[in-house]
């Protein structure tokens, strides 16, 4: 669809010519790299900083207008003060009411019995109310004491009083008002709580189009009709056609649902309102519903427009006791009811379309999915090999590639990965190339980045010779059984270098994408998972904790074979394991009977025992290949695919297998 949009034509040379501002690409990638930075809005922050500067200056002026007080020792009026006056040791005093401050001619230590007290010349005291003032005045005059008086209330100047009393209050109120306005509310209006916090992206700022979305062509084709409607709605109206009110994008995380929504708005050239569903919810009941009303009101004013609500399951979960709702006054349910009302209450002919995305469509309330609301569902699935190749083209537009960088090979070795995973591989490869001082990203950089993301980073720990040898047998058992089992995923790499949480890793990956798994492959998978533990017991006579993750994965796989996929004759073609993503219809009812649970446990144990016996016989018959593979691992630590098969003395047969892409085994 992007080729029909006006604008300068693109050529293949655009990808190789370095742009003076955006690097190795003219158009930005879907992750936003290369997009010119948005201008920073310093206005609100500048006012806040100015207010704090003014307040600081005010405090400095006030502090500079007052002289710091002199440290004075407090002495009693009688007998100390009177004794010093009669002895002629008081030079001057200053009286403020009944308080007297003065200076001694000679330093006096008070109290006299305290040897740690420092002698002081400045003193202060308090005149009792019953003292005869005339007699004290005569005594002071007779001893030549200079007497001054101060008013009981002093004034620092009207401007100082104004600064100290009024200005701080004005500044605090101003800051509060400014913060409220920045939050979107303002005083006396709908305030920040009732206003929708959706970000509005204008068509001129929307630079992502369908050209930036790859690997999900089926989803793009389903959305092309909506783009055509927003561009030319009269073509559909004259035939009585009505565009869907809502479109729900579903799929695993990282498949590009949010990117697809942005590309839809960019293709249509209309305003794009984006908000996360969790932003509707507040602690106050009714706030979410108010924000929903405000969002739809803004979209109607800007029509034609697109509303995009991300992570819809945050507010669109199935209602009822099973989902944990407490009743009609619960905030989340009120927000959901308001969304249902708004989607029923507007005419789609005005050009407002609601898009939403979720990773868990099975828990969305049925009221949202009925016709007239989200009546079109678009599944965004992980891409196949061709789709992954196109995604790599998009994400490497800004990356200078070396001549040996084979994106076709990289796409073939990443089955099951989605767009976010591939973007991460490209980014990690670029970072590795930069650290190694390369001018362009090589294939080795991409493969090392893939290995780092799948297997984890290398751990710099020293294994004892006995632990290293046991780890080699464990990983060689995984690898050898994978090589000998028909239909198993080919072994790509075997390593006894500690990575992540594992002391060693065996990586298996398929030749091509497959979307179903037969029973033969799954039973072979069980054997590969148990092979490391069986190899340890065959050689050392005991087992260790290194097979913890293997046993957990094997148990889960055997349970799904018997309880979900109907691969057990004893249980039959029925599902006995509950779906963790679906709420139970009757929350207080047991998931399954005790008899069914015992039967399921027996079938899981039978499948695991059978796999373990088969692996033990296989490794015993091929003990020489096992020892050869262990010797190569102890010598080289890491074996790639050709070296691993050569060390085991086995031919490399390229048999298809279901996508796994995850390491088998590993000693935690």
Image (tube, rainbow, N blue to C red):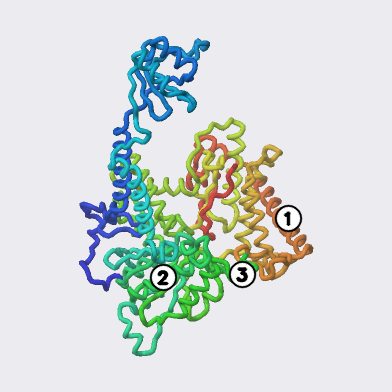
User: Which tag, 1 or 2, sits closer to the chain's start?
Assistant: 2
Q: Secondary structure at mark 2?
A: helix
Among the 4 quarters of the image, the one containing residue 590: bottom right
Using residue 137 as the reference point, say whether residue 364 is left or right of it. Answer: right
From the viewer's side, name the closer residue of 530 and 546: 546
From the viewer's side, name the closer residue of 612 and 447: 447
Decide if residue 246 is in sight here. Answer: yes
Q: Secondary structure at mark 3?
A: loop
From the viewer's side, name the closer residue of 71 and 355: 71
Decide if residue 384 is in sight here. Answer: no
Mark 1 to mark 2: distance in Å?
58 Å
Residue 171, position as x, y percentages in the image: 34, 49
Residue 294, numbered label: 2
Residue 605, numbered label: 1
Residue 327, numbered label: 3
Packing grade of label 3 (10 A; few <14, some 14-19, many >=20) is few
User: Which tag, 2 or 3, sits closer to the chain's start?
Assistant: 2
Residue located at (57% from left, 67% from top): 330
Using residue 229 as the reference point, say whether residue 498 is left or right of it. Answer: right
């Amino acid at each position: 669809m992007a080729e029909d949009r006006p604008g300068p034509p693109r050529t293949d040379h655009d990808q190789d010519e370095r742009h003076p501002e955006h690097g190795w690409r003219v158009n930005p990638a879907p992750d936003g790299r290369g997009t010119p930075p948005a201008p920073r809005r310093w206005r609100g922050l500048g006012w806040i900083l100015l207010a704090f500067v003014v307040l600081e200056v005010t405090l400095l002026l006030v502090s500079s207008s007052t002289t710091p007080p002199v440290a004075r020792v407090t002495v009693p009026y009688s007998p100390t003060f009177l004794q010093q006056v009669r002895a002629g040791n008081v030079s001057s005093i200053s009286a403020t009411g009944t308080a007297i401050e003065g200076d001694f001619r000679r330093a006096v230590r008070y109290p006299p019995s305290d040897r740690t007290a420092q002698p002081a010349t400045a003193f202060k005291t308090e005149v009792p109310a019953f003292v005869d003032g005339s007699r004290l005045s005569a005594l002071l005059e007779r001893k030549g004491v200079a007497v001054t008086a101060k008013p009981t209330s002093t004034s620092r100047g009207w401007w100082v009083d104004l600064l100290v009393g009024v200005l701080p209050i004005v500044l605090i109120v101003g800051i509060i008002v400014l913060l409220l306005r920045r939050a979107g509310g303002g005083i006396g209006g709908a305030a920040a709580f009732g206003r929708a916090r959706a970000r509005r992206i204008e068509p001129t700022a929307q630079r992502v189009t369908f050209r930036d979305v790859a690997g999900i062509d089926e989803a793009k084709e389903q959305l092309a009709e909506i783009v055509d409607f927003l561009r030319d709605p009269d073509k559909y109206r004259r035939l009585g056609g009505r565009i869907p009110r809502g479109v729900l994008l579903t799929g695993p995380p990282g498949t590009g649902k949010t990117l697809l929504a942005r590309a839809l708005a960019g293709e249509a050239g209309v305003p794009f309102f984006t908000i996360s569903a969790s932003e509707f919810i507040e602690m106050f009941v009714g706030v979410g519903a108010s924000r929903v009303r405000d969002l739809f009101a803004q979209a109607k004013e800007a029509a034609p427009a697109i509303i995009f609500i991300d992570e819809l399951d945050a507010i669109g979960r199935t209602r009822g006791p099973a989902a944990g709702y407490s009743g009609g006054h619960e905030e989340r349910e009120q927000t959901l009811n308001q969304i249902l009302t708004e989607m029923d209450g507007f005419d789609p002919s005005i050009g407002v379309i609601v898009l939403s995305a979720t990773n868990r469509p099975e828990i969305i309330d049925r009221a949202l999915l009925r016709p007239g609301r989200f009546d079109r569902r678009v599944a965004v699935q992980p891409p196949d090999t061709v789709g992954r190749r196109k995604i790599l083209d998009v994400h490497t537009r800004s990356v200078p590639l070396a001549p040996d960088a084979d994106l076709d090979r990289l796409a073939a070795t990443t089955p099951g990965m989605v767009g976010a995973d591939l973007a991460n591989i490209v980014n990690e490869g670029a970072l590795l190339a930069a650290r190694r001082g390369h001018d362009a990203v090589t294939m080795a950089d991409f493969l090392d980045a893939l290995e780092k993301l799948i297997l984890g980073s290398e751990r710099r720990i020293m294994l004892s010779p006995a632990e290293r040898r046991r780890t080699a047998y464990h990983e060689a058992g995984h690898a050898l059984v994978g090589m000998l089992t028909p239909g198993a995923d080919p072994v790509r790499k075997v390593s006894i270098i500690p990575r992540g949480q594992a002391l060693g890793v065996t990586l298996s990956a398929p030749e091509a994408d497959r979307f179903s798994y037969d029973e033969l492959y799954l039973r072979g998978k069980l054997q590969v998972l148990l092979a490391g533990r069986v190899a340890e017991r065959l050689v050392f006579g005991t087992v260790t904790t290194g097979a913890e993750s293997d046993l957990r994965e094997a148990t889960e796989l055997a349970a799904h074979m018997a309880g979900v996929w109907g691969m057990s004759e004893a249980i039959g073609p029925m599902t006995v394991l509950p779906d963790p993503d679906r709420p139970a219809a009757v929350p207080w009812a047991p998931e399954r009977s005790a008899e069914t649970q015992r039967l399921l446990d027996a079938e899981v144990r039978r499948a695991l025992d059978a796999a373990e016996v088969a692996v033990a016989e296989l490794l015993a018959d091929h003990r020489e290949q096992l020892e050869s593979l262990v010797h190569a691992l102890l010598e080289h630590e890491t074996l790639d695919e050709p070296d691993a098969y050569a060390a085991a003395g086995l031919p490399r047969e390229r048999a298809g297998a279901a996508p796994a892409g995850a390491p088998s085994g590993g000693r935690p």
